[in-house]
Image (cartoon, helix red, strand yellow):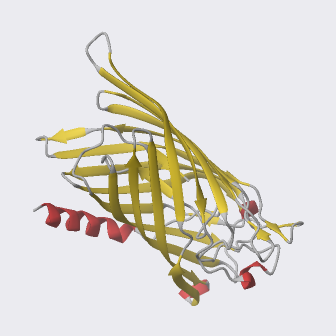
């Protein structure tokens, strides 16, 4: 019965996956994690992400004969392993599918293959669990960490020829990049708030192209519902802000159609049933200024199914954005 329910929910989510992408790392390093499965110790799972970006818009944001609609999809194997009371290591192995279409839906390019592999190490600075004066449970914690993105995805220098053109249609960035993040979570009984910031430091690749460093901050509120002590459902809602300076070509030319900022609303849900967790996360742009208004990001969707390898539930959830 559980397996049938999981399949039905994933099928219902799949038709929504035609949307979304942000130019701040579009296709080559946008690693949004959402709320992690409500497990302890270790888990492994599969995620699906879909994003869309419209590029080569006119000066006023209008479509031109050069305008292209780019769809980025990825299937990812991901997992995490806790060791000790304070450390957690996570890894993401993506396989990407990119499609570019020009006017009238003509396919102008397709790419698929291994993306850039990511490893993240987080450390719990503190965790407190107390009972308030009115007998309510209060918990809060702070995690910090960092990671590395290896250049395992294919990078084609032909996409970077002109400084006035975007360079997003890649399977990988061709560079070794570094990530730093901090996440604070506070929960009173079943109602919680998560604050998160992250910074992605990009290096120059062998073709003398460097993507702009990316800053991200978000705030999410969530509430946990228990159904007959067998199913835990945790809807969440919040805001996500991203900003990134322009890319640099040959260590001196700024890429005109790159960088910018994006503010999105976030709506998601996580469901735990024993050792199995499924979830979905949907992001809707509220305000954006991307590539000097020559690019337009749409909505984004992420779904996952994950398996707890030890069969224990975690005491709290954490949200990270990389």
Image vertical order of residue 264 relative to residue 95, above or below: above
Between 54 and 14, the residue placed more toward the observer is 14
Q: Position of residue 322 (x, y in %)?
A: 56, 53
Q: How many marks?
A: 0
Q: Going 33% across and 53% down the picture, which residue do you hit? A: 42
Quadrant in which the N terminus is drawn: bottom left
Q: Position of residue 135 (x, y in %)?
A: 25, 14
Residue at the extreme front of the image, as rendered: 84
Decide if residue 98 is on the left or right side of residue 313.
Answer: right
Q: Position of residue 36 (x, y in %)?
A: 38, 50
Decide if residue 224 is on the left or right side of residue 160.
Answer: left
Q: Going 33% across and 48% down the picture, which residue do you hit? A: 41
Residue at the extreme top of the image, as rendered: 133
Q: Going 65% across and 56% down the picture, which residue do you hit? A: 178
Q: Position of residue 169 (x, y in %)?
A: 63, 77
Between 120 and 302, the residue placed more toward the observer is 120
Q: Going 52% across and 82% down the picture, which residue do you hit? A: 113
Residue 151 occupies quadrant? bottom right
Decide if residue 80 is on the left or right side of residue 219.
Answer: left
Residue at the extreme right of the image, as rendered: 252
């Amino acid at each position: 019965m559980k397996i049938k329910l999981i399949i039905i929910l994933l099928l219902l989510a799949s038709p929504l996956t035609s949307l979304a992408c942000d130019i701040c790392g579009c296709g080559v390093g946008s690693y949004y994690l959402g709320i992690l499965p409500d497990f302890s110790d270790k888990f492994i799972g599969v995620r699906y992400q879909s994003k869309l970006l419209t590029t080569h818009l006119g000066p006023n944001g209008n479509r031109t004969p050069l305008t292209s609609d780019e769809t980025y999809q990825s299937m990812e194997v991901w997992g995490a392993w806790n060791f000790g009371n304070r450390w957690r290591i996570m890894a993401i192995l993506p396989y990407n599918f990119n499609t570019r279409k020009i006017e009238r839906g003509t396919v102008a390019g397709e790419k698929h293959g291994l993306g850039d592999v990511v490893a993240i190490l987080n450390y719990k600075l503190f965790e407190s669990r107390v009972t308030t004066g009115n007998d309510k449970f209060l918990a809060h914690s702070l995690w910090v960490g960092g990671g590395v993105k290896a250049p395992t995805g294919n990078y084609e220098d032909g996409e970077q020829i002109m400084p006035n053109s975007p360079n997003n249609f890649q399977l990988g960035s061709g560079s070794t990049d570094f990530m730093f993040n901090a996440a604070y979570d506070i929960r009173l009984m079943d109602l919680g708030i998560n604050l998160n910031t992250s910074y992605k430091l990009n290096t120059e690749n062998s073709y003398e192209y460097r993507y702009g460093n990316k800053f991200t901050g978000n705030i999410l509120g969530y509430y946990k519902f228990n159904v007959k002590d067998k199913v835990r459902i945790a809807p969440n809602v919040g805001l996500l802000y991203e900003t990134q300076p322009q890319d640099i070509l040959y260590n001196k030319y700024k890429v005109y159609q790159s960088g910018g900022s994006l503010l999105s609303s976030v709506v998601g849900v996580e469901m735990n049933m024993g050792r199995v967790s499924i979830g979905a996360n949907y992001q809707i742009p509220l305000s954006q200024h991307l590539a000097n208004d020559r690019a337009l990001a749409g909505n984004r969707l992420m779904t996952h199914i994950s398996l707890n390898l030890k069969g224990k539930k975690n005491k709290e959830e954490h949200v990270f954005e990389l």
